[in-house]
Image (cartoon, coloured by chain):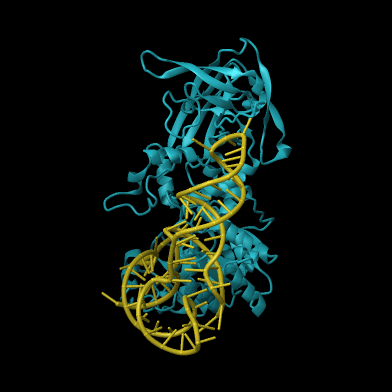
Chain colours: A cyan, B yellow
Amino acid sequence: MTDQSQESSNFILEAVREDLESGRFNYVRTRFPPEPNGYLHIGHAKAICIDFETAQAFGGTTNLRFDDTNPVKEDVEYVEAIKEDIRWLGFDWGNREFYASDYFEQLYDFAVQLIKKGKAYVCHLSPEEIREYRGTLTEPGRESPYRNRTVEENLDLFERMRKGEFPEGSCVLRAKIDMASGNINLRDPVMYRIIHAPHHRTGNKWCIYPMYDFAHGQCDAIEGITHSLCDLAYEDHRPLYEWFIRELGIFPSRQIEFARLNLTYTILSKRFLKQLVEEGHVRGWDDPRMPTLRGMRRRGYTPQAIRKFIGMVGVSKKESVVDVALLESAVRDDLNLHAPRVMAVIDPVKLIILNYPEGQVEELEAINNPEDASAGTRKVPFSRELYIERDDFREEPPPKYYRLSPGREVRLRWGYIIKCVDYVKDAQTGRVNEIHCTYDPETRGGYAPDGRKVQGTIHWVSAPHALDAEVRWYDRLFTIPNPNQPEEGKTFLDYLNPDSMKIISGCKVENSLAQAKPGDRFQFERKGFFCVDPDTTDSLLVFNLTVTLRDTWAKIEQKMK
RNA sequence: UGGGGGCUCGUCCAACGGCAGGACAGCAGACUCUGGAUCUGUUGAUAGGGGUUCGAAUCCUCUGCCCCCAGCCA
């Protein structure tokens, strides 16, 4: 209860601790093994954190190893992107960057070793036949007619596979295990297949490539990985992983599986994310609505927030769906402490202070971050004509509304207390297009010398000084908590939120933002956290909504309906 | 009807035979020049049955429900 150490523990750390105590291992080394066939997302961030932090907890190291055993799916473009994203998260693999393809020769030797032991054979069954012979979940399989070839014949055939004498699909190398095993992975799994395609690293040197099951564990062994942490999906593969270790007599890495991350209102399947991009439902892999690390980065999420979130989620073997609100909370928490505050009016309406001298400009002092005194202060210009948020004025204020309305007083943040005396509406549309106020010159800086209480404080910008901006206001990409489980006859695309992005132009922001550069993060007071988008040009600032502030008024208003 | 896993507040994670706790969400209040932040309080759970035990979320047993596996993908 009062013990803080439990917060940072989990079943993997306990297992590793036991392995060290029992002497099973005397050091800790993990690996993060992405296949370079796509971009990293928040789900990968969980794996990355677990891999790196587990090792760190015991003074160990983590290798980055690209699992590049299938040349037709992979590309160098992805290895660079993956490295960039891991670094952004703040993890360092030093010079321990490896590739499964570095070990192709070694892996080939391992295969020969198994052939010589009579534990592997070249099989000429077609893919369809292999499937038939494999049996089903409830019925045992049948042995391949090629299963009992001699070692010499297998050695010869395997060598010729390597030399490129056979077309793709004509034969494979299989492990000779047990066609009746209840675990289908043990029914003579394929170890090598023929692929006549150039590999992004080995070029045309190879035309046979190891399958995941014959590559992963062996690479772990070669690298001396003590703990190979992976997805629950590989639980069934562990007996095979261990079979290869035993038969080859190689370093006995221990595979431990944990549950992958799922998030409400979010899709994390690579295939579906790809579909979102290719069909144009989002603007790209780095669209701020995407759960990719590049998307979240562009959205304004910080690596610290993502790591904090992963820590809050914990590690277990239970398949779960984490509420995306937890992520948003972690993001707010971090940004609250570090993002400078700024005034920005997203839906502006003109406000004129009738008794303020025309042409006069004052510089008012504003605190940059109330959570961080070292952030200092800045000057914001004040004048007779301002913009305020359209929603901060009501002709007929509802109960509990304490912003501006006719006859009422409100404080302009860091400015003066003003009172609404009149407003004008557009004759055509009926929309309010000007609000007339008077100000109390005694209240400069927002303090009332008479001690009078003003309930509302609203943000504003000086009209002649304001900068134009575009705001991209994001909402959840999907309308239901679990788009992974569509109703009968529907797909996740049926739940796309049509309002997941609203592009709002004509926003007015304070002029201190003139210096803002892409990637800079701010809090727009009373609104939310925003991040400067790379689409920003010299003439137009573009901001992405990272996450809104908690909005209790919206909640009250909602309840009154 | 094979094999492998999993069931603790709404959600996620703890408690490892000894008072079921935390975070997020929710609710109520305090404070406030952001209806922000902060602080306080509060609602709320051991899938079910049987057993072992002084004592069970934890051990045993039966039942139920959920997930994964039949790629020459990873």
Instruction: Identify the residue at image location x=36%, y=14%.
Output: A428
Instruction: Identify the residue at image location x=72%, y=39%.
Output: A373
Q: Is residue A288 left or right of residue A425?
A: right
Q: Would residue A205 be visible to someone looking at this image? A: no
Residue B33's spot in the image, x, y percent? 61, 34
Q: Is residue A553 above or below residue A148?
A: above
Instruction: Identify the residue at image location x=66%, y=23%.
Output: A444
Residue A541's spot in the image, x, y percent? 56, 27
Q: Is residue A18 left or right of residue A320?
A: right
Q: Quick one: which residue is furthest to the top in this view?
A: A358
A201, A416: nearer the viewer? A416
Could you tell me which quadrant the N terminus of chain A lies in?
Answer: bottom right
Q: Is residue A330 left or right of residue A60?
A: left
Q: Would residue A167 be visible to someone looking at this image? A: yes
How many numbered callouts? 0
Examine the image and state in which quarter residue A11 appears: bottom right
Instruction: Identify the residue at image location x=64%, y=29%.
Output: A451
Residue A385's spot in the image, x, y percent? 57, 16
Residue A69's spot in the image, x, y percent? 51, 59
B72, B42: nearer the viewer? B42
Q: Is residue A544 above or below residue A188?
A: above
Could you tell me which quadrant the C terminus of chain A lies in?
Answer: top left
